[in-house]
Amino acid sequence: MSRKDITQMRSQVGSESVRARFGDAASRRNFLKALGTAGIAGLAGCSGGGESYDGQEQTTASGGDDESTETETSSGGDSGSSTLRMSATQRFGTVDPAKGTDYTQVLALVNLYDPLVFPDTEGNLQGHLAEDWTVSDDNQTYTFTLREGATFHSGNPVTAEDVQFSAERFLDINQGYSSLLGNVLSKENVTVEDERTVSFTLDRVHSPFLATLVLLFVVDKQLVLDNAEDGDFGDRGDYGQSFLNDNDAGSGPYELAGFERQAQISFSRYADYWGSFKDGAYDNVVVQIITNDPTVRSLMKTGELDMSSQYQSEETYEALAAEDDIRVESVPTVTTFYFKINTQKAPTDDPAVREAMAYGFDYETARNEIAPGSLPAQGPLPTSFGVHNDDIVQPTYDPERARQILADAGYEEGDITVQNTYVKDYGLEEKMGLLFQQNMDEIGINVELNPQTWGTMTELATSVEGTPHINQVFYGPVYPSPDTVFYNQYHSEAASTWMSMEHLEDENVDALIDEARSTVDADTRAELYAEVQARIANQYPDLFIFVQSKKHAFADDVRGYTFRPSMSFDYWFPDFYQE
Amino acid sequence: MSAESASVLDRVVSAERRELWQRSWKRFTSRPMSVVGLGIIVAIVLLAVFAPVVAPYPEHAGKFTDFSNTLQPPSLDHPLGTDHVGRDVLSRILFGYRLSLMLVAVVLGFGVPVGVLLGLVAGYYGGWTETIIMRATDTALALPPLVMALAITSALEPTLTNAMIAIAALWWTWHARLVQSIVASERSEEYVQAAKLAGASTPHILFREILPNTLSPILVKVTLDAGFVILIGAGLSFIGVGVQPPQPGLGTMVSQGTSYLPDSWWVSVFSGLAIFVLVMGFNMLGDGLRDLFDVEVNR
């Protein structure tokens, strides 16, 4: 999710669309016109193959009118329409709201769909499609009142029935993040009270429930059922899975305007959106998939790209910051960069070995030279969380001490060999690996560097034996609650995913996390969270290297990027505007 | 035949041989291209063998980083600049040559003897033996070495050893073909018939009579092959197979350097040039040898 499979795909931008998009105003209008009408089917046909062709035409039929109207307006108007062109480092695997997990997929979903609640810049939940909600006295039933006047891109109004359908679809398909809800909610317990009221009754008290709802995107029941094909879900067919794989059925601020899975995805502003846009918000957004830094650099310099991804190399940011009309912004995030240590496999099953590693690593160099601008980490939870435990002792670089710990535990130089795995071709992680290898050599631990693709890493994570000793992973909240940091990484129930490559098994940690989940009182929960942080940190299941500062390069007229502490919610396009 | 007359004969033969060698050497040296090629290869082999002594920073080929000194342009301290973790590019190129040359030695050291042996047997016996060996060769020829190496290294571990095995496992095919075609025509030559009549054993005929007559084309092929093997090795390490960090693979260096183009051009450009010079050296030498032996055959 926050750390990506850097695919080998090269971005291939058709020369014609480049000319259309980047040329003079007249040809830009032609391009938009093309987007609004038959062009979509053509573009999708290039990448999606035959199966997506039919579905794509249906999108055109349902959403095309608005788009062409908009295009007419802009070509008749004085200013023309504005387009934000940004880059991403990996493809958009799907735009199905029940399936998206990684940062590009969620980026698309956040803009195409609306959840009931939405995180603000502090991570507090604000009403979104839900205007208001109440929680029952036993803290198990949540009743939401929907906003009036919200409509899907098809023109259908957003009703309680759509919310119920979306929850059922999410739970039935059982992919993506559905287990977040599935653990505590069965679909019979989502009930429609009236057209604008829907309630969720949980199996037990679950304090992170509201926060996880940011990942329940509401789909247009009517449109989905109209486009459902034969499938495993009875009268609901395939639940519209093949349709939603590359079409949108949302009510979000932007509509899907074009989708070439391997190359680019484009969005156009939804004119009847219930919410507000910033003044000067973009009419269109195009996200191009560009995996190599030199391309990003040259496109930014020639003005053919307005915004870079967050995963450019430090050298790229430096080179771009030196340009007159480009600025690089850095924002602190709540994503931590971990060296996840396999705690169940020799020799790293020995806490002494893990402790020695923690004291043998040069955090300062990592932070200042390899990831400048990043913040110090202190334990598993980023310090910006209100419930962070400030008493945790964060190890510092002390090779003497590290050597002593190993000697005390009876190890001699050369006894220990560990494997360090990271994402192949990702410069920052390669540098981290080389630094770690050098540092460990100083304290007598032999490190083998073993770069893999992100896909392979996620596969290795599924078994204790397969998981390498050290795994470099970025992990940040996928919903705005500290629970996401503890449960997904350290609870033994959540073991064997890339998020939990520590394979930590500690009953006390499990019990504390469970207790926090079923505790409603915020102060008690904070105490439990503080304790679980200390328990985790004391076992050295990770090297907590740093808390990431996200960097993007922007063309000077691009404004409005706003950080939100939940994955990809900071790419909410209505925030962005052209100065 | 008395011992004395035998030794006289030997002397005549060896005098003739010496003269032949002298003439060949003269002809070889009369071509500046081939001399330059030989010079390049000798120089690079020496540099690679003595890399720990001649490299300005031998420790930079191993577990070393210096983040205060990254991507420095060429200077007196670092004649070819430094890379993205502050390592001296020149030192890493010299150690990178070791890996490239080792790959050549292993692949050709295994592939050539096997190929030659199979070619000799197939060409000499003909019939079913030939059919079996040559069809197996054709089959193996259908697999591109680069693809085979990718397949093997992704099935096993992407280590240098596995990459070497993969390439070596396919490299014998061309040599088997080459030798088989020569032997097939040589076996009916009079000198082979004479040896047979004199009662010479099959191994003697194969290795003492026929093999020497196939040596020159093999030598030319080996020299030209060396360049190909280096390129395949560089190609593999460019895509991240075969060289594990922090080992300095020339292809890996080119590939990593591309992230820092065009501002920090020296990493990619110099390691690319290093591959170019070595392959060029082998090709120039190979061409020289081929011309040399062609003339020999024509006379």
Image (tube, coloured by chain):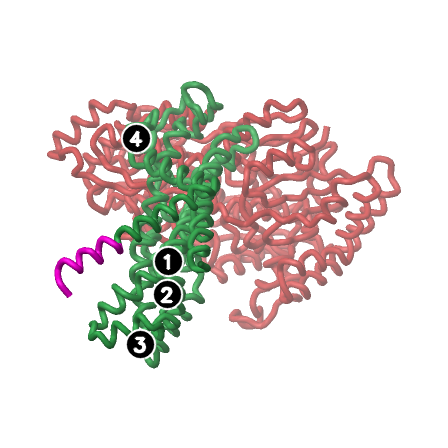
Chain colours: A red, B green
Q: Chain of mark 3?
A: B
- Label placed on residue A438: 4
From the top left corner, tell me how far across and down residue A383 is, in percent. 40, 27
Task: Tell me where the magenta segment starts and ends, as one range.
Answer: B1-13
Q: CA distance from mark 4 to mark 3?
A: 58 Å
Q: Which residue is mark 3?
A: B125
In the image, residue B115 above or below residue A396: below
Q: Which residue is mark 1?
A: B218
Q: In terms of secondary structure, where does tag 2 sit?
A: helix
Residue depicted at x 20% and y 72%: B201
Quick one: label 3, few (<14), some, or many (20+) residues within 10 Å? few
Residue type for callout 3: Tyr
* Same-chain check, marks 3 and 2: yes
Residue depicted at x 13% and y 63%: B2
Q: In terms of secondary structure, where does tag 3 sit?
A: helix
Q: Chain of mark 4?
A: A
Residue type for callout 1: Ile
**Labelled pair 4, 1 in contact (Cβ < 8 Å):** no
Residue type for callout 4: Gln
Mark 3 or mark 2: whose residue is earlier in sequence: 3
